[in-house]
Structure formats: C-alpha cells, structure tokens
C-alpha cells in the first residue's frame, strides 16, 4: 500500500511547490490582469467569429435598428430577427469601425473577466486563507468547454454570464447586510436583482438564472416574512434590470406587433403577425421521466442531445452524483433528528441551491447547452464544496484535486461555433446590381445557410423578406408581403446561398506552407513532398505542373474532397424554385448571378435571381 501511495504523495508535494506562488498577496491582481489578456490573445488565435447566429441575426438586428428597418423588412433572420439587439450593438460597432482583430481581442478579454468573478466568489466561500484553492477553482471554471466554445464570439452567453455571476457575488459579499436587514442591505439586494434582470433583458434565456437566484432567498434561515421580503426586493430589482435593458424593445414590439416578446409566447399575446405558439425550442429536452432523472449521464454520453457542437461534458455526472449524495445525507440526518449535521453553511448552501435550481429550470425549459455557461463555470467550485462537506477535509482535498484536474483538462482541446481566418475587415461583400432598387423586393428563399447578414449590403430602398425560412408566418405577415408586391412593380429577386468547399481554405494554407518551405520550387522538393503526403492523411495530393515556372508542382484536394460547385448551385436554384412556388412566386433560374462575400478571408458566396409573382395569387 505504501508503494502505491508514495508516487501520489510525491506528485502532490511537487504540485504544492509549483503552485506555492499562488499564495503570494499579489497573485490575485496579477492573474486578474493576465487571464483576461490571455483570453483576448486566445480569441485572436481562434480567428474571426463566423458562427451561424452571427450571420443569421446578430449583425442584421443592429443594422435594422440603426436604419429604421424594423417592420419594413420581414424576418430576414427568421424569428430571431425580432430579438432585442442591445447585446449585439458593441460587436456590430467594433466590427464596422475597427480592424476586425480588435473586436476579437476585446470580446475575448471581456469574457476573460469571468475568471475574476469566479475567483471573487470562490474567495467569499473559501475565505482569504485559501487563496490558492480559490485561484485554481476559478481557473478550472474558465476551462469549461461551453465557455471556451463561445470565447470572443458574438453569441452572448459568455457576455451575459458576467452579469449573472456579478449578481451572485454581490449577494455573497453583502450577505450579512441584506440578511440581517442592516443599513444599505436592501440596496445591495436590489442591485443584485438589477444585474440578474439586466442579463435576462439582454438575452431572455438568462431568466433561468434570475429565477434560480431568487428561489434560494426563500430558504435563507430568517423569519418567514423576512424571506418573502428578501425575494420581493430581489424580484423588484430583476424587473428594474429587465426594464433597463429590454423595456424599450418590448415597448417597440408591443407597439408594432402587439406582443412585447414577439414572436415568442404568441399563444398568450395573439399577435396576428405570427402563429399562436410559444416559439421555444423543445427538441433538446429530456423525452421522459427516466431521461429526466439520468439526464447528465445521457448528455455526457451523447452530447448531441444538448449541443450542436461536440463539447466535452464529463464534469456533470460528478456534480450530479455529489448533489444527490448531499441530499441523501441530509435526509438521513433529518430522520435522525440531526439535520444541521449534513447542512452547508448559509452562503455555500445558497450557491448550492442556486446551482441546483438553475440546472433544473434549464433542463425543463431548454436543455440547450450554450445557455448553461453561468453554472458550468461554477461547477468546479460547487464540486469542491460538496466533496469537502461529504469527506474529511484532508482526504477531500487530495481526492478532489486529482479528480478535478482530470475532468477539467478532459475538456481540452475544445471546439467552437465557427471561425474564419482574420482579414483587416470582418466582412467583405460584393454589392449586388439591382434594377430600380426602390421598386424591388429581395426574398430570402433558402432556409440554410443564414443570409440576413448580407441585407446591409443591398440598396437601402430595397425591402428584404424571408419566406418559409423558420418564421411562424401569421395572417398579417402574409398580407404585408403581398401588399409589397402591389406597391412595388419590381423587378424582384431571390437571395440564395452560393456553394463553397470548406476544404478550399485549408488547401490555400497548405499551399502557402509548402511554398514557404521551398518544397514546390524544384523537382526534388516536389518528390519529397509527394513522399510525405503518401505517409500522412493531409487530404491533398501533389500535382506536377506541365510548365514549371517558377514552381514545379502545387497541391490539389484529393478527389473525394473535391466538389462540383456549379452542380450544387443548380441544385439550390431548383429547390428554391419549388420553395417559392408555394408562395406564388416564379424564380427564373437562367437569370441567377453569383456574387462574392467573405467573413474574414473565408468565402460565403451568394446568388441573386429574378422572381416574378404568378397571376393566380394576385389579389
């Protein structure tokens, strides 16, 4: 047995020596500066944000707001066209008026402030004497796969997580003031509510965390009426924060469409512009009771049940089992009439309840992994608290340090929602040539990929309308776009995606590397390169040039990775013709023209085709 434990004890001693500097008084400040800087640099290394949501509505919504196009255009970015654009304004302005990498660095560094809040929360719970543990747990949180997948991009979950964690920190830091009704305590409670409400206003999915922060207030060990007062004050703050970041937008949606959350929850507000359903994605939720009870194990085994990208989620089964163990321990002690023996202290108990409520509400409402960032980054800290409570402190520290190290590092390498290679400008689009743009309508007739981001590059006089791309079209919606046909004689157009081979970008990089190494400048170099490529899977082959001047060879994609771009474009045109016929519109395939567009240096070509209304559907 001694032979078995000796290497582990030696490893622990080595780790303690290597991390001793974290106990230095200046370490928190240094890391508070270094980690956000590192996150900014990591965001730069990943490249330009090229995510689906960004091309669908993050850019378009701000453009529509700034150019008074809300209600003029009709759902170019599907139902997300009517999401509150406040959160997207900074990204839009940075990408329009600064070099593209500036936006990547700024948002990466901003998201890196998650570490600062995690450390502050951990220190509140563990105490100043355990500085090293607080730092390591905060660093572990910033290595969470979901958080890293959105680092520096425009999706908003990392950004709004800052407000949620800030609200939690305010509650913990001023615990005694608001718990005991001391002077200024009510204002701190209201401030925490404002922060949580502001997060929900910027992105409605954060209502999960506003509610999850409010519910544990009803369990604070004070008089019953005092608990109600605490929850009420926090709720008032939430409403104030919600009004500050989303009130103006909700008012605008109410005035324009009769639904402040348009088109969501239209089964409640009954706007004639949309069908009467909730527009909440239920696809990812557990399907039955057994899945509900085993959900962390199910989505860890099959991440596609909760995420569109392969995030590594090993930490969730451990957190789930430990939470159940604590609850079971508490129940046993209750039966023995000793409930305090299994209880956490007040603040740790509050964080634990927040974590559990947030998970349960998230699971029942969405189960979409990108919405869980605020508690994903807290998971290492919560696990640490639970293990310390369930095991002897010394044993807990040794067991947990090893387990958390393995789990956190297992999240690496991480995947993202899509990036392109940097260019000086974030977006470059060849403007289309339209006849009589003031009389034209551009119909987005291709459900995939998202095309709303291109609307900014069309003439301002032209109206853009989405048809059958995911918006729940109501009677007023159909009447509006048909009235546009009455008012605008045309010519009209359909905006379609152009085909591209995603392997072309990697081919260009490989060609540049081969040229830079001088492997294509001579017959000997080409032969050497050919030999290497036959031993590794590089998806390319050497192509010898008939007239070697100045290069003797180049690289080409292997046949299985090549694509017939023209044939794919013809297929897109054919499917769009059938799609538009259902709306009484005839697409002229022979009129289609191809235009170039880029996110960073990656191509996103588009097609523009003539469209005419069929007489049968004219009023």
Image (cartoon, rainbow, N blue to C red):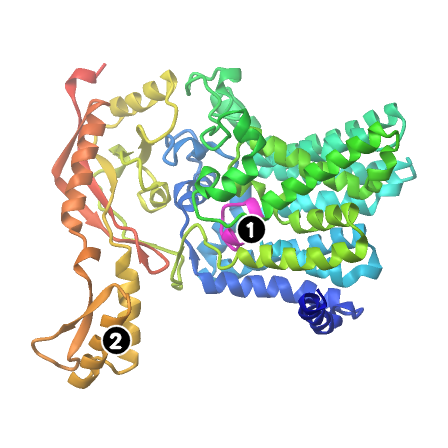
Quick check: marks 1 and 2 in contact, CB under 8 Å?
no
Q: Quadrant of residue 341?
A: top right
Q: To which residue does mark 1 refer?
A: 147
SS class, disc 2: helix
Residue 193 visible somewhere in the drawing: no
| Label 1 Cα crowd, 10 Å radius (few <14 / some 14-19 / many 20+) | many
Q: Residue 17, percent across and down?
A: 73, 74
User: Which residue occupies 55% across, 49% down?
Assistant: 314
Any mark on residue 532, and which?
Answer: 2
User: Which residue occupies 50% across, 30% down?
Assistant: 285
User: Which residue occupies 87% across, 32% down?
Assistant: 221
SS class, disc 1: helix
User: Which is more toward the observer, 537 or 124?
Assistant: 537
Residue 541: in magenta span:
no
User: Which is more toward the observer, 100 or 528?
Assistant: 528
Q: Nearer the viewer, mark 1 or mark 2?
A: 2
Magenta span covers which residues?
Answer: 148-158
Residue 104 visible somewhere in the drawing: yes
Any mark on residue 504, and which?
Answer: none
- Which image quarter is the C terminus in? top left
- Which image quarter is the N terminus in? bottom right
């Amino acid at each position: 047995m001694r032979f078995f434990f000796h290497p582990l004890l030696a490893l622990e001693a080595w780790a303690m020596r290597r991390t001793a500097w974290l106990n230095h008084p200046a370490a928190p400040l240094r890391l508070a500066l270094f980690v956000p800087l590192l996150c900014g640099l990591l965001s730069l290394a990943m490249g330009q944000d090229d995510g689906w949501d960004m091309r669908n509505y993050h850019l378009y919504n701000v453009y529509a707001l700034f150019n008074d196009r809300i209600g003029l255009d009709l759902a170019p970015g599907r139902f997300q066209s009517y999401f509150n654009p406040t959160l997207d304004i900074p990204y839009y302005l940075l990408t329009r008026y600064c070099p593209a990498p500036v936006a990547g660095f700024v948002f990466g560094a901003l998201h890196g402030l998650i570490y600062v809040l995690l450390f502050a929360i951990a220190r509140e719970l563990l105490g100043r004497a355990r500085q090293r543990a607080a730092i390591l747990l905060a660093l572990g949180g910033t290595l969470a796969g979901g958080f890293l997948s959105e680092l520096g991009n425009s999706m908003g979950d990392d950004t709004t997580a800052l407000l949620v964690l800030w609200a939690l920190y305010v509650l913990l830091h001023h615990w005694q003031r608001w718990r005991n009704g001391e002077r200024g305590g009510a204002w701190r409670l209201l401030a925490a509510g404002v922060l949580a409400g502001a997060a929900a206003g910027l992105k409605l999915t954060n209502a999960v965390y506003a509610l999850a922060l409010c519910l544990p207030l009803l369990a604070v060990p004070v008089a019953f009426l005092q608990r109600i007062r605490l929850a009420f004050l926090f709720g008032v703050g939430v409403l104030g924060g919600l009004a500050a970041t989303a009130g103006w937008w909700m008012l605008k949606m109410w005035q324009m469409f009769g639904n402040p959350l348009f088109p969501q929850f239209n089964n409640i507000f009954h706007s004639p512009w949309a069908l009467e359903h909730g527009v909440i994605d239920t696809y990812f939720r557990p399907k039955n009771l057994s899945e509900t009870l085993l959900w962390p194990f199910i989505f860890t085994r099959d991440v596609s049940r909760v995420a569109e990208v392969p995030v590594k989620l090993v930490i969730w089964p451990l957190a789930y089992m430990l939470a159940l163990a604590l609850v079971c321990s508490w129940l046993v002690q209750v039966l023995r009439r000793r409930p305090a023996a299994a209880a956490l202290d007040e603040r740790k108990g509050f964080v634990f309840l927040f974590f559990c409520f947030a998970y349960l509400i998230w699971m029942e409402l969405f189960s979409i992994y990108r919405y869980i960032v605020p508690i994903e980054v807290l998971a290492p800290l919560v696990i640490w608290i639970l293990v310390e409570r369930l095991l002897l402190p010394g044993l807990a520290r040794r067991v947990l340090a090893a387990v958390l190290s393995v789990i956190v590092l297992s999240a690496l390498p991480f995947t993202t929602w899509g990036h392109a290679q940097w260019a000086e400008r974030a977006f470059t689009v060849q403007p289309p040539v339209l006849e009589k743009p003031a009389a034209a309508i551009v119909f987005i007739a291709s459900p995939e990929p998202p095309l709303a981001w291109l609307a900014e590059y069309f003439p301002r006089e032209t109206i853009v309308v989405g048809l059958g791309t995911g918006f729940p079209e109501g009677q007023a919606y159909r009447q509006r776009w048909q009235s546009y046909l009455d008012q605008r004689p045309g010519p009209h157009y359909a905006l379609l995606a152009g085909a591209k081979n995603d392997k072309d970008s990697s081919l260009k990089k490989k060609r540049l590397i081969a040229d830079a190494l001088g492997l294509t400048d001579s017959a000997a170099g080409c032969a050497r390169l050919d030999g290497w490529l036959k031993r590794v899977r590089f998806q390319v082959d050497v192509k010898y040039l008939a007239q070697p001047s100045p290069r003797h060879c180049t690289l080409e994609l292997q046949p299985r990775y090549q694509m017939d771009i023209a044939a794919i474009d013809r297929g897109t045109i054919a499917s769009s013709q059938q799609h538009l016929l259902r709306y009484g519109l005839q697409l002229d395939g022979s009129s289609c023209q191809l235009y170039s567009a880029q996110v960073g240096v990656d191509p996103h070509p588009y097609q523009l085709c003539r469209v005419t209304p069929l007489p049968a559907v004219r009023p």
